[in-house]
Image (cartoon, rainbow, N blue to C red):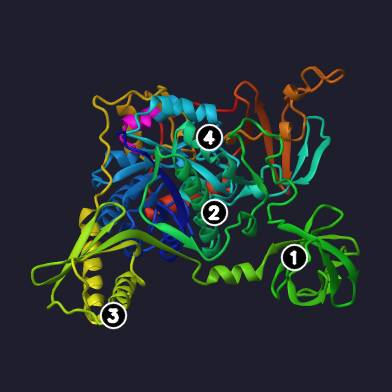
Amino acid sequence: MPQPHQIELLAPARDADIGIEAIQHGADAVYIGGPGFGARAGAGNPVADIERLARHAHRFDARIFVTLNTILRDDELEPARRLAWQLYDAGADALIIQDMGLLQLDLPPIQLHASTQTDIRTPAKARFLQDAGLSQIVLARELDLTQIAAIRDVLEPARCGIEFFIHGALCVAYSGQCYISHAHTGRSANRGDCSQACRLPYQVVDAQGRFVAHDAHVLSMKDNNQSLNLGPLIDAGVRSFKIEGRYKDMGYVKNITAHYRRLFDDILEQRPELARASSGRCRFGFTPDPLQNFNREFTDYFVHGRQIDVGAFDTPKNPGQPIGHVTRVAGDHFELQTDDPALTLANGDGLCFWDPLKTLVGAQANRVEALGDGRWRVFPKDPMAQLRELRRGTPVHRNRSMDWVRALERKSAERRIDVWLTLSETADGLSLSAIDEDGHSGAAQVALAWAAPRQPAAAEHALREALARLGETLFAPLGIALALPRPWFVPSSVANALRRDAIAALEAARAAAWQRLPRAQPVEPPTPYPEDTLSYLANVFNHKARDFYARHGVRVIDAAYESHQEPGEVSLMITKHCVRYSLSLCPKQAKGVVGVKGTIRAEPLQLINGKERLTLRFDCKPCEMHVVGRIKPGVVQRAEREAAEHALRFYRAPPRGTRSFE
């Protein structure tokens, strides 16, 4: 019989406690940052915490992936190598990497995964990374089902699996291909410190200086939600399904992990050729609902091809869900009628509304009073004078429910591994065997003289109850068999000791059976890279990365943008999102429209935010947008001073003349 394809639900963790809850709520794997080089400057964790999380995860055969996915200077390579060994010793199952220089180092025998920042969009790039020794690759979020399937067709499933983001915030750029933050502030997104220029409002101006959009967040995307596409993604070859959110809080991780756990469990019930990637089943004390967490509304992005409504242009904030409308405004409060009379408000709820300029205005409830029939009186935290646009008839949204928040602050799930218990008679007493859903077994024996029970039925019932009391263990009894040739009276103390010892033996057997994920071996001789020239877009920031690409046949290797060898105008962002398309100004949209055909061209646009000015250029053949600009002199000067003061070392390519966007 062929082995079932394992489906992995991969959840984020800002810290070890959140990671443990992700496991409890159904994650098959968790990704988390270590103490450095983790592409999220504010989400680092001590190695000891990684070890604690790994110990918990491995009890369920779940895995821990640690992000080591910034681009590295030469002086950072040795600290990164030492950290890799520390994480390996702590029990981490894989490292998620971006910098190919790491492959030139003496790393531990730990599995390596290609980060989304490696920008995997083509079968050739995917196949190369497989042949270079990467065991799992995170595809670009912008790919559609056909493109994902094309990558699946060139990979060998036993060597390399496909990972894909299914939920959370969307980075508008192809991951690893955004340099606006570094150009404007010196904070590099590829080094984990993005300033999120994509969430700012911009004036959009055409070549004649006419306004196309005013104060619009045209680079801000809605949030990713692939809840309805899991089956097609499985069919396209995805095996690891990733939730975004290493900066997100505990409630988000609990809720979204539980949401997808339920969806995948339903799929697995219907498709026997698929299997869970870890052990145990979850029981939730709440009903998961993605709408309850922070979101900018949802999109499934490009999975089914280009969609026009992918942007959160009005606001990068959470607009929440509509709950009713204002019926009265007073000096210190307002009243509202809910659309659902059963809906309840609570002190501290986050309420908001859109003003006439389409600005989202918050109105947090300091205190609420129920008036009956779905009517509520709300005393806001801020003075009513600050809510001057709030008037009768204004629709009200709720973007935070305190009842929901409090529910997820409590214990909200438990995860148990099914176990079959069998009590047997031995020559000198009793034996209890425990076999779990994965086939692991443990047993315990006790010497005990046979004694007949006074009430056989009651004694059997009490014995079954005692054996089933698995309490705070990992296990839940799926069946209890009393394989006894005659009725026994078993003191409860004896039954309890048998159960504890058998379960302890089973846990020990599970721990002994745990195996590390195998490290993939690169193909020899080295597979040629798909191109022989690399620009700054390849993010080569150290000489080991340069040596890696040279070893794979690349002849011309430019330095990363962070090396400051691109002083002129270049693409600071490359994105599949197209502002022209989203504003219905794309020439392809006008094709065939009488009176419009031929009059709309993909001419550049300008983005203006304060003193910042960026140019949008449109490459219509691959249907991509480039955000073009130049690095600020002050950023370069500060970096040069820092490099001199701290003896920083990084790769610089030989001069090749001035480069510019074409």
Assign the C terminus to one quadrant of the image: top right
C-alpha separation, residue under disc 3 versus residue under disc 2: 47 Å
Sequence-wise, the earlier of marks 2 and 4 is 4
Residue at the spot of label 4: 232
The local secondary structure at tag 1 comes to strand
Residue 255 in which image quadrant:
bottom right
Q: Please name the amino acid that badge 1 sits on.
A: Leu
Residue at the spot of label 2: 259
Residue 600 in which image quadrant:
top right
In the image, which residues are magenta? 127-135
Q: Position of residue 581 (x, y in %)?
A: 72, 31
Sequence-wise, the earlier of marks 4 and 3 is 4
Mark 2 surroundings: few (<14), some (14-19) or many (≥20) residues within 10 A: some
Mark 4 surroundings: few (<14), some (14-19) or many (≥20) residues within 10 A: few
Q: Position of residue 157 (x, y in %)?
A: 35, 32
100 over 155 or under it: above or below: below
C-alpha separation, residue under disc 1 versus residue under disc 4: 37 Å
Q: Please name the amino acid that badge 2 sits on.
A: His
Q: Position of residue 119 (x, y in %)?
A: 48, 35
Mark 1 vs 4: CB contact within 8 A: no
Q: Magenta span has 13? A: no
Q: Residue at x 26, y 28 (%)?
A: 523
55 over 260 or under it: above or below: below
- Of the numbered discs in the image, which one, if any, rests on residue 351? 1
Sequence-wise, the earlier of marks 3 and 2 is 2
